[in-house]
Each structure stands twice: as C-alpha cells, then as structure tokens.
Image: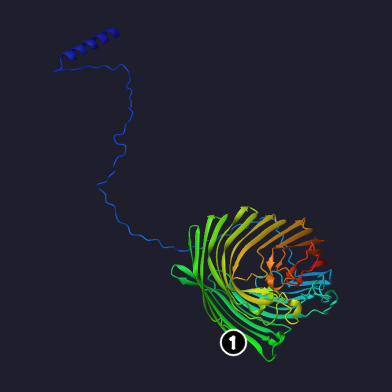
Amino acid sequence: MRKLGITLLMFSALSAFAQPDNLGSLELKVTDRYKAQVKDASKILEQPNYQDSLNQKIEVQYRISSQPLAVRMQPEILSPARISAIEVPELYRAFIRGGYGAYNTGLAEIYYNSKRSSQRSYGFDFRHLSTNGGVSDILYDDNAFSRNHIGAYYNRYFRKYTWSVQGGIDLDKYSYYGRPQLNFLPNDDTLTLGKAPYNWYRSFSIQTSIKESKEKELGWLKQMNLGYNYLYDNYNSSEHDLNLNSDWVLPAGDRDLFLELNSAYFTNRYDSLYQGADSTNVFQQNFVQFQLKPYIRVEQDEYALDFGINLYFVGAEESIPMESESGAYFFPELILRYRAVPEVLSVVGGITGLLERNNYRQLSQMSPFILPGQNTVPSRTIKAFVALEGILSSNTSFYVEGGYSNLRSDAFLYRNPSFYTDTVSYGLEVLYQDLSAFYAKGSISYNWEEKFLLSASAIARDFALSEGEQAWYRPFFEAQLESSYTYREKIGLALNLNYIGARHAFRQEENLNFESMLKPYVDLGLKIDYHYNTRVGAFINFSNLLNSDYDIFLGYRAQGINAMFGFTYRL
C-alpha cells in the first residue's frame, strides 16, 4: 500500500512539471504532524529612528519652592574615642642663676614670667655681672667693671592686634684701666697710679608697640613702635633719644606698596670741663631725622624683586659752629631673589643703602672706653652684594655672600699712641672716615636631632682708604666656631672659639715704641651644665681658656683665663 502511494505521488509531480499552464487539482495527503519553526531574526537598521509624527510635546512651566520640614531625630550618642595623652611641658614661672669665679667675679640672674594665657603675658628680669682684676702688668689697682640690668614687659593679646610695653634700667660701670707697665719708660715698674678712673653709664628706656595679629587686621598698618631712651654718665654727659617707627602696606592697583616710615629726635649735651676747657662752655647737639622707604615687591614664578628708594632727611643744630650734616640723602633699594631649587637653593643680590645716626648710646656700645664729648656725625653706607643660601642635607644649611661697600663718615675708634703722657684723654676717641671695602663672608650650620649643634662663620675684608689712613681696629679676617651637645638631658656642653685677625692701631711713625699692628688672637670659651633634675642644676664656665695674651685696644689688655661655677633653680 505504501509503495503504491509513493508511486502515485511521483507520477502526479511529473504531471505537474510537464503542465505549467494548467495545474488542475492536486490532492495531498498528510502523513505526519505539522511542526512549526521560527527562523533567526536580523536587524534591518542598527539605530532605528524613532519619530512620532502624530503627537506634539506640551510645554510645561514649573517651579520648585523649598519648605523646611521639622525632622524629629535623636542620633545615637557616640562614645568618646580613646586619644593618647600628649604631655604638655611644664612651664616654670621663675629661673634663678648665680655663680662666683676667679678675680672676684660675681654673677646673679633672676627671670620671672607669667604662665600660658591667650589674653596676656608679663614678666621681669634682673642681671648682674662684675669682675675685678685678672689683667697682668697694669699700673692701676684694678680693672673693675660691673653690668647691671632691670627690665619688665607686658603683652596684651586682642583679636586684631597685640599691644606691648617694655622698659629697662641699665647701670654699667667701666674702668679706664688701659695703662700697662712700659719697659721703655725708666722706673715705670715702680709707678702706682692708684684706682683707675671710671665711667658710669646710666640708661633708662621705655617702648610701646602695636602689631597686627593677621594680615590686614589693622588695615594699612602692620606695626608701630614708639620708644624713648635717656642716658647720662659721670661726666655730666646726657642724651635724650625719641623714635617712632612704623610699617605700612598701601594698595597700589593690583599690587601692594610697602612703606617704612620712621622718625627720630635726639639731643646730646657734653660738659667740656672733661676736655680741659672752660666749664661754662657746654657742647650741645640736636638732631631730627625722618626716613621714608617705599618699595614694591614683584613675584613671577621662581623670581621675586623688591625695588624702591630709601630717603633720609636730617636736620642738625650744634652749639659750636661746625660743618653742618643737615640735608637729604637718597639710597637705592633693589633686591632680586631667585629660587634656583625651591626649598633647597636660593640666590639673592642687589644694591641697598642706609644711614646710621651714631648717637652717644650707639657709640658707647661700640666700646665702653670711649671718652665723653665725642662729636656725632651720621654715617652713610651703600652696598652691592650677591648671596647664595640653601641646605646641603636635612640637617645642614649654609650661607655665602660677597660684595662691595662704600662708606661715608663711618665711625672708627682710635687711641693716641702716646696715651701714657696724656693725663686727661686716657680713653678712646671717635674718628669719622670715608672708605670702601670688598668683602666675602659665609656660614654653615649643622643640627643633629637637637642634641648636637655646630655652626661656623668667617668674614674677610679688603679696605681702601685715603693715603695715610687705616681702618682702625677693624680686622681683615674674623672667624667663629660654636658648638653644643646635650647628653641624655643631663649634661650640656657648649664651646665657643673666636679668631680675630691683625688690626691697625695707629701710624707706626707716630710711636716706634709699640707695634702699630695688633697681633691676631684666639679666645676659647667652654660651658658645662649639669641638670640634677628638672628644677635644680649646676654649671661651670671657662673664659679665655687658652690664656691668650692680647690687646682689645691699644693698652687695654684682655683678662686672663677665668673660671666660674654656680647653680640654677627653676620655680
């Protein structure tokens, strides 16, 4: 039956192929179930374009108005975190130091300060140091000196500024002991001059200032200082000195204009009796000085430039007609800084100038052995320099500078080389000279964990003066070495070494009995501190440990080796 069906089906198919125009009727018989199949789908377009041509979007206008809603929330209280305790170092109110040494040398120091406060701080201090003797081959009975100081300060801290006031009293006695035994004078070893003449410098000072706490807190003003000093001595010499200093920052377009505005007034009065003249003839000088220093700072990348001008106006009046020093003085102010390697190496150079007043107080600080009645002349200095500063490692830094200085009416100390024949002018006088100098100086510092500190510095100069003149008592070379070491917070060692090169004292042809060039010398000092606990300690200090024999000034010899011991106490 199955064979017959297949035969009929093949016959029907052949008949249909042979007759394409008239198919007629076709009879099919299904011999199995229909099985539907779905083919794989494929996209006609990768990104079909959806466009609705029937509906239009409706423009909607809306706004959002905020309204606070009360939220009732009680967060869970967190327990405090455990923070390691940081010990705040104890701040002592007082420090007392006292000692005694050879040649009847006495030391007493007291310091008292308030404890930590965000509103105010205050304190006072007292210092005394005196000695008698220790200089060999002098014809006076002693070479005593005594330095005494009492001071106090008060600081009040406000939100925008800090107000400070401080004052002090200094009472210093120095002997004019510079009369050594001279071998070229007959019977000089049998001569006794008794007690050395001396001078008391009595100084009283007070100063008040205000300083901004942060930038722009006081507007254009950064700080302002007002000070007054009064000085008089044993020879009826007196000086009143009043000064006002201020720093400002003024707006100048897109930059700031820095301005230093200072003024000073001082008057000197000397009794000419000391110099052998008529005691009614009193020498008096009055000086008024104004300083105006505007400059602008420009910074670009690693460069910074300060350029401006330094102006001084000086008015002088003297009781004895002399060459007037009144007038106006102009100095350039040009400083260029370049950070060659940021935070590591910088180069600084430029030209700058200034004027120094040289009043009696400043001259007595150059040397206490000056004679009263010295003329006051302002000194002018212009300096061109270039410097290199940076760090060699994390604990080593250095500074190197070289340049040229031009000085006018610079103050020098001088002593008559025939001082042993002068019974009146036995001290130093002040000379004013013009000179120029090339110089080079440098320093290096090393710090190892705040336990070992080492610093060294040196300066070399080459002076040029008028024919026959010299840079009196100024060495051509100076060097200094300082170091300190702390061992286990118990023992502290400090070493100080000074080298002072040769110095001109006078013209050789004026006296052939002395060497006109003072020889160089080395002065070594050593300090040893012992801390028994945080409050009690002891110390021993050595000065001129090498027992160097040298002259500070012509005829004024240095004290020999000295040792002082004492105790310290903190309260």
Residue found at the far bottom of this picture: 280
Residue 170: image location, x then y, percent: 72, 78
Residue found at the far right of this picture: 190
- Can residue 315 be seen here? The reply is yes
Please tell me whether residue 75 is drawn above or below residue 129 in the rendered image: above
The residue type indicated by label 1 comes to Pro
Residue at 60% from the left image edge and 58% from the top image edge: 400
Q: Nearer the viewer, residue 367 or 230?
A: 367
Residue pointed to by mark 1: 321
- Quadrant housing residue 3: top left
Q: Nearer the viewer, residue 317 or 475?
A: 475
Residue found at the far left of this picture: 21
- Quadrant housing residue 205: bottom right
78 vs 104, left or right, is left
Number of numbered tags placed on the structure image = 1
286 vs 479, left or right, is left
Residue at 27% from the left image edge and 45% from the top image edge: 51
Residue 265: image location, x then y, percent: 59, 82
Placement of the C terminus among the 4 image quadrants: bottom right
Residue at 21% from the left image edge and 10% from the top image edge: 11
Q: Nearer the viewer, residue 462 or 506?
A: 506
Residue 216: image location, x then y, percent: 53, 71
Please tell me whether residue 452 is drawn above or below residue 407 in the rendered image: above
Placement of the N terminus among the 4 image quadrants: top left
Rendering colour mode: rainbow
- Can residue 1 be seen here? The reply is no
Q: Secondary structure at mark 1?
A: loop
- Quadrant housing residue 186: bottom right
Mark 1 crowd level (few <14, some 14–19, many ≥20, 10 Å Cα): few
